[in-house]
Image: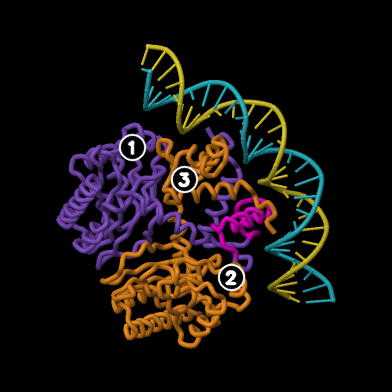
Chain colours: A orange, B purple, C cyan, D yellow
DNA sequence: AATACTATCCGGTACAACCGAAACACTTCT
DNA sequence: AGAAGTGTTTCGGTTGTACCGGATAGTATT
C-alpha cells in the first residue's frame, strides 16, 4: 500500500508541519529536528518559498497566509457550514457556553467554526483543530452514525487515552454509541479536557449520512443534570434546523 | 535565480492551488487543466492524501482542513492579531461598516481578520484573501511606510488595473503615498471594487516598521465627505491603540 | 452486451533530487 | 584586529526515484 508515494511531497509537508508546530524556524533547526541534511532542508525551504506557501524573513521561515486562504475557501464550500450559519450563534446565546461545529476527516474530529457565548470558558479551540473521535462528545455523536465497519476499524487502531476519564474500553464505547442513537445526543465528561463537559448532537442529511456535529462545552461545575438536559434540547434543535437547511438549500 | 527549485514541491502545490480554486476535482480533470499526464497527477494526489493535506472521497479530491489548522496556528502567533483583538469589533460597532485587518505578505495585502458591523455590505472577504497593494486603501497605507526601494520594485513590476479607477500611474501613486504619510490614513475610491470606498490606517510598531493596516469599507453612496472624515478618525484611533498594544505586550 | 471513460497499477529510463563539501556571511570571542 | 565559531548558501556528481507510457481494472452510458 505505502508504495513510495513521492518522497518529495512527503518531505515538503513534513517541513510545513514542523514549521507550523513551532511557529517558524531556521534551516538548521529544522534540519536537526527532522534529521535531514541542512542543504536538503534549505533546498526545500527555497522551493516552498517559491510556491508562496512559506515566507522567509531574514533566515526565519514561517508558514504563509496561503494556508488560511486555502483552508477558508474549502470551508466556505462545505455545505454544513452554510447550513449551520445562524444556528451556532443562537446556541451560544441561549446556552452562554462555548459552541463549535465539527466534521469528521481522516478519522478525526475537526473544528470548522467556533462561537463563544457570553460565559464561555476560553478553550484553545480554533478552526482546523483536531481531536480523536472517541474522546469527545461530537466525535461520539458522529461515530454513532457511521458504518459498523469503520467503527470497528477505529477501535482496532486503539482508543488512545487523552485524560484519565477517556473511554478506552471498546465495549463501553459501543454501548455509549448505542445510547447516543437512542437519545439523540452524546455527552463527554472530562474525557478530553479534565473538568469540561461537552454535549453534542449529530447533523445528518436526508440519506442519514453523518455530516457533522454541533457541540456545547462548559465547566463541570456549571453543568448539572438539569442544565445538561436543557442544553441537549437546544443542541438537538439546532442540529435539526441545520439538517433542514442542508436538505433544502 | 529560478534554479530548479525542486520540481516536485512546485507541482504538488500547483495541484493544491488547482484543487483550492475549483473546490476539488478528479484526477483526470486536474491532469487536463494542469497539462500533466494523468498518471503523474494520480501519483501526486496519492502522495498528498498520504500527508493528510488532501482528502479523497470516492475519486473526488479536496483540500483538507489541515490548511485551516496551519493557517490559524500561524495567525494566532502573529502579534498584530493579538494587539488588534477588541479594536476591530469597536470600529465595526462605531462605523457600522465592514472592517478588516490586513498585513503585507509576498508583495500583496492579505486579510487576517474580518469584522462586520451592523450595516456591513456583504463582501467576499475572508481570512487569507489577498489583493494587490496599490489598488486598496490598506495596501496604500502600508506602502506609504515601506522602503522607497521596495516601492520602486513594486512599481517596476507594473501596476495592474483592477477596476477602471485603479491607480496605474506611478507618479500618481507616489503622490498619494505622500498624502497618506501626511494625513495618516489612506483612501480608495472604487479602485478595487467598483462602488466601494475604503479608508485605512497603517499600524506601525515602535521602530516605525509597518505591521499591518486596519480598513473600513462601505458603499460610495453612504460615505460622503464628512462621513469619511469621521471614519478616518475612528480607524486612526484604532490603529494607535493597536500600536500601543503591540509595543507593550 | 458493447462502448467509452476514468482510475489504478506497473516498470524501465532519464533526470532531478540529494547531500557532501566548500564558500560565504555574521557573531563572538581573545 | 584577527581568529574561531555558527549558520546559510552555492555547487555539482551520483544515484535513487519521479515520471509517464502503456496495460489493466473498474465504472458509467448507450
Q: Chain of mark 2?
A: A
| A249 up-or-down from B51: above or below | below
The reply to whether residue A62 is in sight is: yes
Is there CB contact under 8 Å for labels 3 and 2? no
Q: Chain of mark 1?
A: B
Label located before the other in sequence (3 or 2): 3
Tell me how far mark 3 sits from mark 1, CA to CA.
29 Å
Q: Chain of mark 3?
A: A
Q: Would you name the residue on which mark 2 appears? A: A154
Q: How far across and down, in percent of the image, does residue A229 sit? A: 36, 85
Does the magenta-highlighted stretch encompass residue B42? yes
Which residue appears at 45% of the width and 39% of the height? A26
Q: Main secondary structure of the magenta part?
A: helix
Q: Which mark is residue B170?
A: 1
Which segment is the magenta one?
B27-56
| A67 up-or-down from A55: above or below | below
Q: How far across and down, in percent of the image, does residue B56 sit? A: 60, 64
Secondary structure beneath label 2:
helix
Q: How far across and down, in percent of the image, does residue A2 sit? A: 68, 56
Q: Which mark is residue B199?
A: none
| B112 up-or-down from A168: above or below | above
How many C-alpha atoms fall within 10 Å of the one at disc 3: few (<14), some, or many (≥20)? Answer: many
Q: Nearer the viewer, mark 3 or mark 2?
A: 2
Count of numbered marks: 3
Q: Would you name the residue on which mark 3 appears? A: A54
Amino acid at each position: 500500500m505505502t508504495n513510495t508515494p513521492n518522497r518529495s511531497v512527503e518531505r515538503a509537508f513534513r517541513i510545513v508541519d514542523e514549521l507550523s508546530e513551532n511557529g517558524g524556524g531556521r534551516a538548521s533547526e529544522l534540519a536537526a529536528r527532522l534529521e535531514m541534511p541542512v542543504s536538503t532542508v534549505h533546498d526545500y525551504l527555497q522551493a516552498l518559498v517559491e510556491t508562496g506557501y512559506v515566507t522567509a524573513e531574514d533566515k526565519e521561515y514561517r508558514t504563509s497566509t496561503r494556508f488560511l486562504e486555502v483552508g477558508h475557501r474549502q470551508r466556505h464550500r462545505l455545505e454544513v457550514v452554510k447550513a449551520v450559519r445562524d444556528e451556532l450563534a443562537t446556541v451560544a446565546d441561549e446556552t452562554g457556553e462555548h459552541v463549535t461545529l465539527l466534521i469528521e476527516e481522516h478519522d478525526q474530529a475537526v473544528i470548522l467554526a467556533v462561537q463563544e457565548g457570553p460565559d464561555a470558558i476560553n478553550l484553545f479551540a480554533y478552526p482546523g483543530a483536531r481531536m480523536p473521535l472517541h474522546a469527545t462528545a461530537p466525535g461520539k455523536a458522529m461515530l454513532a452514525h457511521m458504518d459498523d465497519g469503520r467503527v470497528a476499524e477505529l477501535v482496532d487502531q486503539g482508543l488512545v487515552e487523552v485524560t484519565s476519564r477517556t473511554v478506552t474500553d471498546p465495549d463501553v464505547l459501543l454501548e455509549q454509541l448505542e445510547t447516543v442513537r437512542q437519545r439523540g445526543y452524546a455527552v463527554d465528561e472530562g474525557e478530553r479536557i479534565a473538568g469540561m463537559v461537552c454535549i453534542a448532537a449529530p447533523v445528518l442529511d436526508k440519506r442519514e449520512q453523518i455530516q457533522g456535529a454541533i457541540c456545547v462545552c462548559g465547566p463541570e461545575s456549571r453543568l448539572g443534570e438539569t442544565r445538561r438536559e436543557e442544553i441537549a434540547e437546544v443542541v438537538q434543535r439546532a442540529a435539526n434546523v441545520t439538517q433542514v437547511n442542508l436538505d433544502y438549500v
